[in-house]
Amino acid sequence: MLLPNYSGLLLEAGVDEAGRGCLAGPVVAAAVILPPDYKHAVLTDSKALSIKQREMLREEICRDAVAWAVGEASPAEIDEINILQATFLAMHRALEGLQLQPEYLIIDGNRFKSFKETPHACIVKGDSKYLTIAAASVLAKTHRDELMCRLGQQYRYYGWEKNAGYPTKQHRTAIAVHGASEFHRHSFTLLPKEQ
Protein backbone atom coordinates (compact mmCIF):
# COMPACT_ATOMS: atom_id res chain seq x y z
CA MET A 1 0.00 0.00 0.00
CA LEU A 2 1.43 3.38 -1.01
CA LEU A 3 1.73 6.21 1.51
CA PRO A 4 -0.64 9.20 1.29
CA ASN A 5 1.73 11.93 2.50
CA TYR A 6 5.41 12.76 2.98
CA SER A 7 5.53 16.21 4.56
CA GLY A 8 2.52 16.13 6.88
CA LEU A 9 1.19 19.28 5.19
CA LEU A 10 -2.33 19.37 3.79
CA LEU A 11 -1.63 20.59 0.26
CA GLU A 12 1.18 18.32 -0.89
CA ALA A 13 1.58 17.86 -4.65
CA GLY A 14 3.16 14.81 -6.22
CA VAL A 15 5.02 15.42 -9.50
CA ASP A 16 6.18 12.95 -12.15
CA GLU A 17 7.03 12.89 -15.87
CA ALA A 18 6.65 10.61 -18.87
CA GLY A 19 8.61 10.36 -22.08
CA ARG A 20 12.13 11.37 -21.13
CA GLY A 21 13.72 8.51 -23.06
CA CYS A 22 11.65 8.90 -26.24
CA LEU A 23 12.97 9.86 -29.65
CA ALA A 24 9.83 11.82 -30.54
CA GLY A 25 7.08 13.85 -28.94
CA PRO A 26 7.07 16.13 -25.90
CA VAL A 27 8.16 15.30 -22.39
CA VAL A 28 5.02 15.46 -20.25
CA ALA A 29 4.70 16.09 -16.51
CA ALA A 30 1.74 16.03 -14.15
CA ALA A 31 1.18 17.47 -10.67
CA VAL A 32 -1.53 16.07 -8.39
CA ILE A 33 -2.85 17.06 -4.95
CA LEU A 34 -4.97 14.30 -3.40
CA PRO A 35 -7.18 14.50 -0.31
CA PRO A 36 -5.03 13.91 2.82
CA ASP A 37 -6.88 10.72 3.78
CA TYR A 38 -6.89 9.28 0.23
CA LYS A 39 -6.51 5.52 -0.14
CA HIS A 40 -6.38 3.34 -3.23
CA ALA A 41 -5.77 -0.39 -3.54
CA VAL A 42 -4.63 -0.38 -7.19
CA LEU A 43 -2.86 2.97 -7.72
CA THR A 44 0.90 2.60 -8.19
CA ASP A 45 3.69 3.45 -10.66
CA SER A 46 2.03 3.72 -14.11
CA LYS A 47 4.65 1.39 -15.66
CA ALA A 48 3.39 -1.43 -13.41
CA LEU A 49 -0.22 -1.02 -14.59
CA SER A 50 -2.07 -2.27 -17.67
CA ILE A 51 -3.46 0.20 -20.23
CA LYS A 52 -6.98 -0.57 -19.00
CA GLN A 53 -5.98 0.07 -15.35
CA ARG A 54 -4.27 3.36 -16.27
CA GLU A 55 -7.35 4.60 -18.14
CA MET A 56 -9.64 3.65 -15.24
CA LEU A 57 -7.29 5.33 -12.74
CA ARG A 58 -7.00 8.45 -14.88
CA GLU A 59 -10.76 9.00 -14.56
CA GLU A 60 -10.70 8.34 -10.81
CA ILE A 61 -7.72 10.65 -10.19
CA CYS A 62 -9.27 13.50 -12.19
CA ARG A 63 -12.52 13.04 -10.24
CA ASP A 64 -11.04 12.60 -6.75
CA ALA A 65 -8.02 14.95 -6.76
CA VAL A 66 -8.16 18.24 -4.88
CA ALA A 67 -6.23 19.67 -7.88
CA TRP A 68 -4.35 18.29 -10.89
CA ALA A 69 -2.66 19.64 -14.00
CA VAL A 70 -0.50 18.47 -16.88
CA GLY A 71 2.40 20.34 -18.52
CA GLU A 72 4.50 19.70 -21.63
CA ALA A 73 7.84 20.71 -23.10
CA SER A 74 8.02 20.35 -26.88
CA PRO A 75 10.65 18.49 -28.94
CA ALA A 76 11.99 21.90 -30.08
CA GLU A 77 12.39 22.97 -26.42
CA ILE A 78 14.09 19.66 -25.61
CA ASP A 79 16.55 20.25 -28.47
CA GLU A 80 17.18 23.82 -27.33
CA ILE A 81 17.67 23.39 -23.57
CA ASN A 82 18.29 19.58 -23.19
CA ILE A 83 16.01 16.86 -21.84
CA LEU A 84 16.73 17.45 -18.13
CA GLN A 85 15.93 21.18 -18.28
CA ALA A 86 12.89 20.47 -20.48
CA THR A 87 11.66 17.96 -17.88
CA PHE A 88 11.90 20.65 -15.18
CA LEU A 89 10.09 23.07 -17.53
CA ALA A 90 7.22 20.58 -18.05
CA MET A 91 7.03 20.01 -14.28
CA HIS A 92 6.89 23.77 -13.61
CA ARG A 93 4.15 24.17 -16.23
CA ALA A 94 2.12 21.43 -14.55
CA LEU A 95 2.58 23.13 -11.16
CA GLU A 96 1.58 26.51 -12.61
CA GLY A 97 -1.59 24.86 -13.92
CA LEU A 98 -2.77 23.77 -10.47
CA GLN A 99 -5.79 25.69 -9.21
CA LEU A 100 -4.40 25.55 -5.67
CA GLN A 101 -0.92 26.57 -4.57
CA PRO A 102 0.75 23.51 -2.97
CA GLU A 103 2.51 23.89 0.38
CA TYR A 104 5.01 21.13 -0.40
CA LEU A 105 6.16 19.17 -3.47
CA ILE A 106 7.33 15.58 -3.73
CA ILE A 107 9.12 14.80 -6.98
CA ASP A 108 9.80 11.39 -8.50
CA GLY A 109 13.54 10.95 -9.05
CA ASN A 110 16.68 12.55 -7.65
CA ARG A 111 16.77 16.01 -9.28
CA PHE A 112 14.48 19.02 -9.48
CA LYS A 113 14.77 22.75 -10.12
CA SER A 114 13.06 24.66 -7.30
CA PHE A 115 9.59 25.99 -8.07
CA LYS A 116 8.93 29.47 -6.67
CA GLU A 117 9.56 29.31 -2.91
CA THR A 118 7.79 25.97 -2.44
CA PRO A 119 9.78 23.44 -0.39
CA HIS A 120 10.28 20.06 -2.04
CA ALA A 121 11.78 16.61 -1.66
CA CYS A 122 13.08 14.35 -4.44
CA ILE A 123 12.17 10.71 -3.89
CA VAL A 124 13.80 7.95 -5.95
CA LYS A 125 11.13 5.48 -7.09
CA GLY A 126 8.59 7.84 -5.53
CA ASP A 127 5.90 6.62 -7.92
CA SER A 128 5.93 3.25 -6.14
CA LYS A 129 5.99 4.82 -2.64
CA TYR A 130 3.56 7.78 -2.57
CA LEU A 131 0.01 7.98 -3.93
CA THR A 132 0.31 11.55 -5.25
CA ILE A 133 3.43 10.75 -7.29
CA ALA A 134 1.80 7.54 -8.59
CA ALA A 135 -1.26 9.59 -9.56
CA ALA A 136 0.97 12.10 -11.37
CA SER A 137 2.74 9.25 -13.19
CA VAL A 138 -0.63 7.90 -14.41
CA LEU A 139 -1.82 11.31 -15.64
CA ALA A 140 1.48 12.10 -17.37
CA LYS A 141 1.66 8.71 -19.09
CA THR A 142 -1.98 8.55 -20.22
CA HIS A 143 -1.86 12.14 -21.50
CA ARG A 144 1.33 11.47 -23.44
CA ASP A 145 0.22 8.09 -24.82
CA GLU A 146 -3.03 9.65 -26.06
CA LEU A 147 -1.10 12.49 -27.72
CA MET A 148 1.34 10.07 -29.42
CA CYS A 149 -1.61 7.98 -30.68
CA ARG A 150 -3.08 11.10 -32.30
CA LEU A 151 0.28 11.99 -33.87
CA GLY A 152 0.58 8.36 -35.00
CA GLN A 153 -2.50 8.88 -37.18
CA GLN A 154 -0.57 11.58 -39.09
CA TYR A 155 2.76 9.72 -39.22
CA ARG A 156 1.72 6.09 -39.57
CA TYR A 157 5.06 4.50 -40.40
CA TYR A 158 6.73 5.33 -37.05
CA GLY A 159 4.28 3.18 -35.03
CA TRP A 160 3.81 5.84 -32.34
CA GLU A 161 0.39 4.47 -31.35
CA LYS A 162 2.26 1.34 -30.15
CA ASN A 163 5.73 2.60 -29.15
CA ALA A 164 4.74 6.12 -27.94
CA GLY A 165 7.94 7.47 -29.52
CA TYR A 166 10.35 5.15 -27.70
CA PRO A 167 13.35 3.76 -29.66
CA THR A 168 11.94 0.43 -30.86
CA LYS A 169 13.40 -1.39 -33.86
CA GLN A 170 10.35 -0.49 -35.99
CA HIS A 171 10.62 3.19 -35.02
CA ARG A 172 14.32 3.38 -35.90
CA THR A 173 13.80 1.50 -39.18
CA ALA A 174 11.08 4.00 -40.14
CA ILE A 175 13.44 6.93 -39.35
CA ALA A 176 16.12 5.31 -41.55
CA VAL A 177 13.65 4.89 -44.44
CA HIS A 178 11.47 8.01 -44.15
CA GLY A 179 13.73 10.41 -42.24
CA ALA A 180 12.85 12.29 -39.05
CA SER A 181 9.63 14.27 -38.59
CA GLU A 182 9.08 17.68 -37.02
CA PHE A 183 8.11 15.86 -33.81
CA HIS A 184 11.44 14.05 -33.46
CA ARG A 185 14.07 15.22 -30.99
CA HIS A 186 16.95 16.08 -33.28
CA SER A 187 19.42 16.44 -30.39
CA PHE A 188 18.90 12.71 -29.61
CA THR A 189 20.70 9.88 -31.41
CA LEU A 190 17.82 8.91 -33.68
CA LEU A 191 19.79 6.20 -35.46
CA PRO A 192 22.62 4.11 -34.01
CA LYS A 193 26.05 5.23 -35.21
CA GLU A 194 27.54 2.91 -37.82
CA GLN A 195 30.46 0.82 -36.57
Image (spheres, helix red, strand yellow):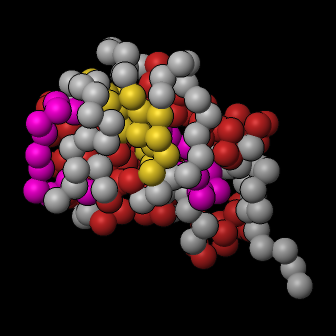
Position in image of residue 186 (x %, y %): 77, 50
Q: Going by the picture, which residue comes out furthest to the front? A: 8
Position in image of residue 177 (x %, y %): 73, 67
Picture layout, residue 142 above or below residue 119? below
Position in image of residue 34 (x %, y %): 22, 33
Classify residue 34 as left or right of residue 45: left
Front-most of residues 163 and 130:
130
Q: For the magenta stretch, what is the residue range?
A: 18-46
Picture layout, residue 145 above or below residue 102? below
Classify residue 50 as left or right of residue 152: left
Is 29 magenta? The answer is: yes
Picture layout, residue 37 above or below residue 157? above
Is 55 magenta? The answer is: no
Residue located 68% across and 38% down the image: 85
Residue located 47% across and 34% down the image: 120
Position in image of residue 80 (x %, y %): 79, 36
